[in-house]
Amino acid sequence: MASIEDQTSPPVVEIPIKQILEELATKINSNQTCKFNINCASVLDGAVRGFTRLSYNPNNRMVIRFSDDKGKYEDDIDLGGPRREFLRLLLVALMQSSMFEGKEDSLNLALDSQAIREDRYFIAGRAVAVSLVHGGPAPGCFSKTLFDSLVQGPDMCIPVLDDIADCELYNKIKKVCLKLQYKRFIYLYHHAFSDLLKNVFHYKSHSLV
């Protein structure tokens, strides 16, 4: 018999990520803009300032102006090229920041207390989402564990030994795993050999009768 909760709760509908991104892209208002003045030498800091402004609206079209270390701005009109270049540089800066660790093509989140205090993990998530929705590149360097955690939820991901970036910790855990595997092998071997001896003894006993 179904409970009252089962009857009143709507069924959970899983919407594909692609569909979510496409729907968000349709909400971009080309008539409203958010301007970003970006120093090429500090793209991440410029992005943080832009994303944390009270006037920032992710549904507005992004307009990017690059400047050099002397504060001289480029005169190019942003028809999409500067925006895509900014998003590309932003993702590169994020992946090289202290918020991520691991192999270049299999990154995971790292623990950075200062980034937590400055809410930079939220900014990193926003930057990835903005890049996907506003025509920038996708971060193709996440590990499978991190990707599954973001898309399906932390409870659905299965961490593996290679996710550990610290070499010393990795080697220690690997040694423990190898020892456990060896003990498991010895245990299974012992029981299999014991069963074999029992079967042979049983067979010979019956053969002698």
Image (cartoon, rainbow, N blue to C red):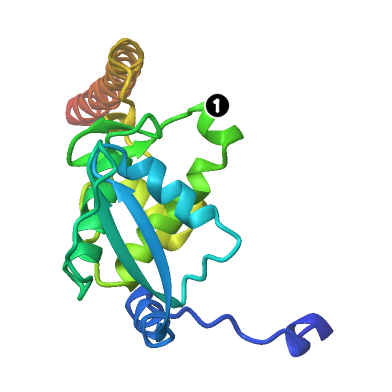
Q: In what quadrant of the picture does the N terminus appear? A: bottom right
Of 31 and 146, nearer the camera is 31
Question: What is the secondary structure assignment of the residue under circle 1?
Answer: helix
Q: In what quadrant of the picture does the C terminus appear? A: top left
In this rendering, would 117 be left or right of 27? right
State the image quarter where residue 193 is shown: top left
The amino acid pointed to by label 1 is: Ser
- Give the class, few, some or many, for how many residues have Cα within 10 Å of label 1's Cα (few <14, many ≥20): few
Question: Residue drawn at (31%, 44%), measured in percent from left and top?
Answer: 43
Of 126 and 167, nearer the camera is 126
Q: Position of residue 24 (x, y in %)?
A: 42, 80
Residue 157 in sight:
no
Q: Position of residue 60 (x, y in %)?
A: 44, 77
State the image quarter where residue 17 is shown: bottom left
| Residue hosting label 1 | 113
Above or below for 132 versus 209: below
Q: Position of residue 98 (x, y in %)?
A: 38, 29
Residue 164 in sight:
yes
Question: Residue drawn at (31%, 10%), measured in percent from left and top?
Answer: 168
Above or below for 30 versus 66: below
Q: Residue furthest right?
A: 4
Of 135 and 185, nearer the camera is 135
Question: Residue drawn at (48%, 28%), measured in percent from left and top?
Answer: 112
Of 125 and 29, nearer the camera is 29
In this rendering, would 141 be left or right of 146? left
Question: Residue drawn at (24%, 60%), measured in percent from left and top?
Answer: 138
Q: Position of residue 200 (x, y in %)?
A: 20, 25
